[in-house]
Amino acid sequence: MKFTCDQLARVAWGEPAMREGGELFYRCPHPDRHKNRDAHPSLKINPKKDVWACFPCNAKGKAWALAAFIAGCDPGDKAAVKAWLKERGLMDGAKRKAKANGRGPCVATYLYTDAQGKPLARKLRFEPGPNGKKKDFAWERWEGGRWASGLGAIKTPLYRIAEIVNGPFVVLTEGEKDADAGAGIGLATTTSGGTGSWRDDHAEWLRGKDVVIIPDADEAGRLEGQKRAAALYAQAEWVKVVEIPGSKDLAEAIGKGMTADKVWDLIDSAPDWRPAGGAEILESAMKFIRRFLSLTQSEARAGVLWVAHTHAFDAAECTPYLAINSAEKQSGKTRLLEVLRLLVSRPWFTGRVTAAVLTRKIDAAHPTLLLDESDAAFAGEKEYAEALRGILNTGYRRGGAASCCVGKGAEMGYKDFSTFCPKAIAGIGKLPDTVADRSIPIRLKRARRGEVARFREREAQREASEIAARLAEWSASNLETLRQARPDIPAILSDRQADCCEPLLAVADLAGGDWPEAARKALVELCADAQADDDSVSATMFRDIKATFAEKHVTKMRSGDLTAALAEIEGSPWGEWSKGKPLSPSRLARLLKPFDVRPDRIGGKDSQARGYTLYQFEDAFRRYIPAETVNPSTDRINTGENKDFESVNGNSVDGSKNAVSPAKNAGDGQVDTLKPEIGGEKESSGALNPGLSSADAVEI
């Protein structure tokens, strides 16, 4: 294969360090031969004539001689030069090797030196190979006058360290290609390597310097930039994070004509980087979400806490689901998932997948599942609907699993697949009760015209990825704190709701500001309301019976009178309980029998009237009536200093408000009724007002 001097140089170094007229200047691969370690590039190439020269080394020639010069071997040693060329895909033999290992040709070599310019290691960059393998890299170390495979015990310093170690200013890029491109336009550039290459000791090289970080313009790059800024904040004189608009990285921007002056304009206009507090990050995320969706304050706050939770998922034992529903289509369900996809960790946005894929991907990747059209999924194929229900039922707690058959024939066995991952589920109508019980409801309404901004994903992505990067960095730096957190849980929440809300409250407490109290108000409003709305038939029955006794101010009621009163309650099912007919006394008795509540004589010795007394329901009221919700706009919520919630009107809401009127004068013919304090420190004994005799009890 024919190759040129320019091609060889680009394989070895990437872009030239400098251009003058039609000539290209690269730094010499043997800096130890130069007095100034080749701080100013001295290897010159004339692409038109295809010749090169390095005058301090007294070396020049054509392409073959340059290959030998870069490889560090004698031009007459053809085997060594050919081996170097083949390794970099510049001869036909390298093609056969590339097919064998899946790599494409080596297109760049990045030399790492010590602070004095002596070579330590080099990084080889390979393009994608013929089998579709992605570009990758390989390391070689300088050992005994030759290049050996791997880094061994070498810990590489920052790239181009000899050029930036004594300067007061440095630009930190994500990769070596960007650093070389920046140096080519006169910037003092360096890097630790690609994403994930930063080490704590790298910051020591930049202590006291002015540092500008130019990350790649994608989610991973912005997150890497935030991590490096956080690591350098206490070491550098000042830190700025600058993104080049319209380009994915610095090298691309320079290729499009970006000059050093334009880069300096961006640097000068950028603010100094400061570590954001959790409250500030959460507020920016909430503002971003509400720009595109019509959400209540409580829904937006709960949603943002859930987004932060996806980045701190490794610290949680439970994960709440977001149950996103609406009464009508075009209310923003899919749009909310689209917005969340830009903010959450490891998003997986899908509408319909096979049960096998769903199970295996959750187990392998622990993504944040954003599931759309759940109503169609649960109403569709029975096998898939049941598999989905099983995954959702078990996947809210760490250790949850789905057992599936694996293998074929005689090798068939089973495997437990983890189902634990954050999930947001969108659809019209209600989720199955067992799934809703593990969820925080987000009930969307169609936005009014002009209420929200139009969502253009490409335009929103840049801002969203910056927020996501800050959330990820903040969460990662506080992961152990969140793991050890034991936040105070509002007593009004059920046990399962308390489990699900705990990781969100841990995030809110860590964020500080007004988030701890506001988060509790939001979750109480959403979860307690949902609990009341999703009552079972039994819970609804006991709630309505309790309200009926309270309204009548009695402690005894005949069966017929009780069912008649229940049938009059608007919004309850008792008026059309059986084929359009009201609930009968016999059917009420059958509903109450499993709870050990049976009709009995309630009159005196001469009365045969049968019915129920308030005493009979005391245990059922405590066990099955959901806690009533707190109005977050008026009620004060416990933040840890008090054991109970208190509303501004003085009624206890630590488990249920007083559902009946307080005691009135016995002479008025009215009685006191039960006032159980569910969830508080004390519980009523169930006795009526001691000052009220049995003769005072009113009967209907």
Image (spheres, helix red, strand yellow):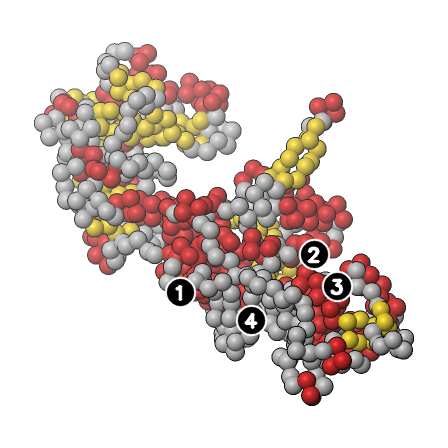
N-terminal of the two: label 1 or label 2? 2
- Tell me if mark 2 has few (under 14), some (14-19) or many (20+) residues whose alpha carbon lies within 10 angstroms of its own: few
Check residue 432 in the rendering and tell me which mark sits there, or answer none. 2
Residue 156 x %, y %: 27, 29
The amino acid marked with disc number 3 is: Ser
Task: Rate crowding at label 1 as few (under 14), some (14 to 19) or many (20 or more) other CA atoms within 10 Å.
Answer: few
Query: Residue 263 at x, y = what percent?
Result: 24, 51
Residue visible at 45% across and 20% down? Answer: 97
Disc 2 from disc 4: Cα separation:
32 Å
- Distance Cα–Cα, label 4 vs label 1: 24 Å
List the residue tagged with mark 4: 652
Q: Could you tell me residue 541's position as x and y percent?
A: 75, 68
In the image, which is nearer the foreground, mark 3 or mark 2?
3
Assign a secondary structure to mark 4: loop
Q: Answer above or below: position of 202 versus 335.
A: above
Q: Secondary structure at mark 3?
A: helix
Q: Is residue 686 above or below residue 698?
A: above
Q: Which mark is residue 538?
A: 3
Residue 349 appears in the picture as rendered: no
Quadrant in which the C terminus is drawn: bottom right
Q: Amino acid at mark 2?
A: Pro
Task: Determine whether label 2 and label 4 are within 8 Å by CB.
Answer: no
Q: Relative to residue 641, is residue 250 depicted above or below?
A: above
CA distance separating discs 3 and 4 = 24 Å
Q: Nearer the viewer, mark 2 or mark 4?
A: 4
Q: Label 1 is placed on what type of residue?
A: Asp
Disc 1 target residue? 514
Tell me which amino acid carries mark 4: Ser
- Residue 173 or 24: which is nearer the viewer? 173
